[in-house]
Structure formats: structure tokens, C-alpha cells
Amino acid sequence: MHAGKHSQDDYTAIEVDLDLIRRLDKSGPRYTSYPTADRFIEAFSADTYTHWLTQRNIGGITRPLSLYFHLPFCNTICYYCACNKIITKDRGRSGKYVKYLIREMEMQSALLGNDRRVEQLHWGGGTPTFLPDDQMRELMDATRQHFDLAPDGEYSIEIDPRKVGTETVELLGEIGFNRMSLGVQDFDENVQRAVNRIQSEEETLNVLRAARANNFKSISVDLIYGLPHQNIISFNRTLERVISADPDRISIYNYAHLPGLFKPQRRINEVDLPDAQTRLDILKLAIKKLTGAGYLYIGMDHFAKPDDELAIAQRQGRLHRNFQGYSTHADCDLIALGISSIGKVGPTYSQNVKTLDEYYDTIDSHKLPIMRGLELTADDLLRRAIIQALMCHFEISYESLEIAYLIDFKNYFKEEINQLREYEKEGLLTLGEQSMTVLPKGRLLIRTICMTFDKYLRQEQERQRYSKVI
């Protein structure tokens, strides 16, 4: 998607211009997919999905598979959370869910025939470690029964350190997990109380040490900025403690306060949230501390050590972005299992039903639990390739896109190029004769730049302008 390798320095350079961010940053998609999930339609059914799944082998090119399991249960509620989750103390509920996941897996693998090689697997949530040890073992054993897990695959799990002892980490290593991400958010006690997630540093470090002892290849720590009571001084302390724990990757997500959409967020007192300037200052501090400690800026909210696979993949031009964020496995077809999970097969996306009742009913009637999805047009695929390349490598080569998609780039994207010229004047990017490159100043605004290529957003803006005029 882009020409040649970069020198180490210019690749990961990032410049924080707070004034520019304040002026140009707008809320927009995170582009874990393009088109984004809000564009999916209900006319895309289980039948459409089945058609594409059985087409996978035609033409002799078989993409490896990636599996995603959504495990929605949590013991307690974290007020900032925007995931699809179910709060319960009853482990019996997850036992039933695992049985149905296995039935969904049987239906999916039957459609795949002998073509079941998996290079990537991810358990997300909720809290995957809500499952007791025997249920985790049962789910992983069934996965191996129905799929062929590559010995050198990437098998990751999201961990809530409050619920996990050394024995569980040992079990995870034993059943095949080799990567984990630890939810921390912030070590500050005031912040933890305000979001209902009390988690000691010791609990977190114990899990990290256990993961190292059990040969996990990559350990990631997730932080959030913009939470109640956060300030520069308190977040600086959290950063120092995380850096001294030395994880392979660190993600710093921006908290989006949308109490109208996510009920738990109504329990957060808005007056306790840091103002826009403080949030920007925290972000600037985080970037300075992490890059100072030797982490490279990968893109969006992600930092990694130079020898971590993500950083290596980016240097070699094979970094990819999917529903779990950045990934080193480029063109996997993603089979998604469990409620609300989103899959990607060939030129399609699909999403499962969102409630347990619908999920159980559909599987009981021997149907795949798909509620909506999308078949991508040629234009969608082209724009997806551009957004993917910008998100992962901060540049695109016109020629390679012209060859792959049979277009004349400058003609096809005339309007977009005009808009990008404005960003060029601001020093965010350069529009060359044959390529476009996002400069260090534009890297934190990569979403804003990608939004230029989002045809659906453009159509919406035009409709809004039109309705305003009338």
C-alpha cells in the first residue's frame, strides 16, 4: 500500500500542536472498519453471510481465519464502559452461553468445510475471565475441535486484573493464549472510586509478572484519559508506574462521555470531568513520557516498544487495522461469535444479534444469529484501502491504488484533494505528485484526515447543509 520502508526516525515522529488539535479535531469514527458499523443494513441476512462464507475458496486463494469471541459478562459495572455487557454474579449464566457459543462455532465451521486454519484469536468482553477455569478450557477445547489453530498464531485475551490470580494466568498460557491486554485506566484512587473500578497497582503487577512467567509474547496495558478527577499530576504518577512495569504496548484511549447512549455513564458526575484543555495537556504529557521512555507511536491511541510485533509490522509496511485495533495479520477473514460481535468475510461485514434471548432463540432454530451487515461496493473497498493505509502507515501511493482499483486517483478524488489542500496548508500532510504523506503534526489528527475519504459522512454533511438551506 505504500512505497518502501521508512527510516526509523521519520516513521514514528509525532508532533503535538495543541492549538491545531483544538481547532481541527472533530469527533468521528475510530475506523476499525470502513464503512463503519452504523452503516450496516438489516437486508444483509444469515443467507447473504452463508453465501460469502462458502465462496471463500473460489479462485484458489484462501485467506487464513481470525476468530473473535464476545464474552459479555462482568461482576461489577465500570461507569465509563460503552461495551455490550451483562452484569451478573451468576457463573451459571456464562456456562449456558459457552454451550451456545460452541453450537454457533459448529454451524460456522460446517460451512467452511476443510478450510479452517486460524492465525488469530481474540476473547473480548465484558470480562472474558468472568468464565471459571473449566468453562475457559471447555471453550478452547471446542475451538481446537472445530478449527485448526496455527502453532505460531496470535491468541489474545482482555484481562481485568481484579479477577485474575496466578493460577488463572497459568491456565490461560496452558490452553494457548500468548498475548493479553490489561485494563488499568488509571491507578489514582479518586479516579477509580468515581468510575467504580477499584484496582490496586499490586493486583495489576501480579498479573503482568504471571504473564511473563508463563511466556506471554506481548502484554499491553490500557489507560483512559478524560475520566473524572484526572489531572496532569495524578496521571503523571499513573504513567510513571505503568512505564516502570515495562509492558510491551500501552494504549491511551480518550474517554467519550455519552450518557444519553450509555446508561452507566449517567453515574459519572459531569462537573468532575477534566476540561478540554486539561485533557489535551494530559495527552501531550502521555506522548512525551511514553516516547521518552522508548515507546514508538504506532497510531491512534497505541504505543509499542521498538521490538514489539506491532512496531516491526509497521516498519515493514504490513500493519493492519481491524475491530480489535491494530494487528499484524493483514488479510484474515474474521469469524465473529457471540452476541453483538462483528465479522468480516470477503467484501462483507456482518453483526450478530445483541441480546442473549435473541441469540439463544436463533441458535435453537438452527440459524446463524446474524442481524445485519453490509456487502461493500467497489468504491467502499477503495476507500477502505486508503483509510487502512493512512491509519497504519500514514501514507498512500496513488499508483498502487490506481493499479489495484483501476482508477485515476487525482480525478476520482478531486473533491477530497481540494479539502486535503487545506490540511496541507496547516502542515498536517503533503500531497505529492505520486503519494500523500501525513506529517508528524498530522498524526494525532489522523481520524480527521481519514474522514475526508468517508463518502457516507460527506453525504450526511451535504444533506444537513441542504436541509439548513431549505
Image (tube, helix red, strand yellow):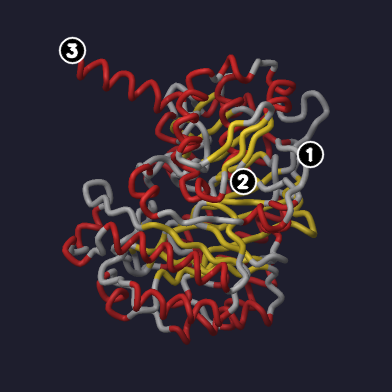
The type of residue carrying mark 2 is: Cys
Residue at the spot 26% in from the left edge and 71% down from the top edge: 229
Mark positioned earlier in the residue sequence (3 or 1): 1
Name the residue at the bottom extreme.
Answer: 202
The type of residue carrying mark 3 is: Ile
Q: Are marks 2 and 1 in contact (CB under 8 Å)?
A: no
Looking at the rendered image, the quarter that the C terminus falls into is top left
Q: Which image quadrant is residue 362 in?
A: top left
Residue 207 on image: x %, y %: 55, 80
Say which of marks 2 and 1 sits in front.
Answer: 2
- Evaluate whether residue 15 shows in this view: yes
The type of residue carrying mark 1 is: Asn
Residue 331 on image: x %, y %: 70, 40
Q: CA distance from mark 3 to mark 2?
A: 41 Å
Residue at the spot 64% in from the left edge and 78% down from the top edge: 170
Q: Are marks 3 and 2 in contact (CB under 8 Å)?
A: no
Q: What residue did someone put label 2 on?
A: 392
Name the residue at the right extreme.
Answer: 60
Q: CA distance from mark 3 to mark 1?
A: 58 Å
Q: Which mark is residue 470?
A: 3
Q: Which mark is residue 212?
A: none
Q: Is residue 342 left or right of residue 328?
A: left
Q: What residue did someone put label 1 on?
A: 114
Question: Which residue is nearer to you in this view: 329 or 309?
Answer: 309
Q: Which SS class for mark 2? A: helix
